[in-house]
Amino acid sequence: MHAVTVHVNGRAQRVVIDALAPLLRVLRDELDLMGTKEGCGSGDCGACTVLVDGLPVNSCLFFAVDADHREVTTIEGLAHDGVAHPLQRAFVEESGLQCGYCTPGMILAAAALLADDPDPTPERIRAALAGNLCRCTGYQSIVEAVRAAAVHVRDAAAAKPASGGVRRAVRPRA
Ligand code: FES
Ligand code: FES
């Protein structure tokens, strides 16, 4: 067993875990953060996407020990002071979800994208979300939701240029 300290949504969490425990299991079973969904369990669907140091990872494959002393963001950590993140609002307003099972992972992958590219093309959005599968929407409304959120994020950044947020970097998931 290993003791690790993971900073989840801005809060340090110390857990004692098996060396091979996936981050997904620690988030859901140890920390009771049920927003992160398990789909395939094998890295194919993206439902379990969370951010580690601002980058999207499939938490079903990411060893929790590798998150030691790193920043993890789950869907529960996106809203601030009770105000939904622009992506959360846009997914609702643009009907970017139906059953909602893929939505936490979609939104976190999109958050990493917008942190890297505040004005992504539809093609870039589709590429960034290629690892996140949705069985309900047909994807077009998801792309429109991300585009709408991008406008809101840019407007907010213009009004408050010193605001923080997800680190600016995106790379392919393992
Ligand atoms: Fe992790 Fe499907 S549950 S990629
Ligand atoms: Fe149902 Fe995407 S909204 S899987």
Image: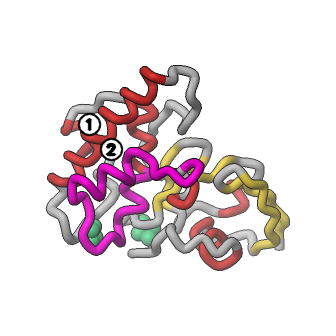
Q: Are the residues at dot 2 and dot 1 in contact (C-beta closer than 8 Å)?
A: yes
Q: Is mark 1 within 8 Å of ligand 2?
A: no
For label 1, the SS is: helix
Type of amino acid at the residue the image marks with label 1: Arg
Q: Quadrant of the N terminus?
A: bottom right
Q: Is mark 2 within 8 Å of ligand 1?
A: no
Q: Where 21 falls versus 138 (above or below)?
A: below
Left or right: 150, with 25 as reference point: left
Q: Residues within 10 Å of mark 1 (few under 14, many from 20)?
A: some
Numbered range of the magenta stretch:
80-108
Residue 40, given in percent of the width and then of the height, sits at 39, 75
Q: Where 157 falls versus 134 (above or below)?
A: above
Q: Where 45 falls versus 107 (above or below)?
A: below
Residue 90 included in the magenta stretch of the image: yes
Type of amino acid at the residue the image marks with label 2: Ala
Left or right: 2, with 132 as reference point: right
Query: Which residue is under mark 1?
Result: 124
For label 2, the SS is: helix
Residue 51, given in percent of the width and then of the height, sits at 54, 50
* Numbered circle sitting on residue 2: none
Quarter of the figure with residue 62 = bottom right
Measuring 69% from the left and 71% from the top, which residue is drawn there? 31
* Numbered circle sitting on residue 128: 2
Measuring 37% from the left and 27% from the top, which residue is drawn there? 155
Left or right: 7, with 107 as reference point: right
158 or 172, which is in the foreground? 158
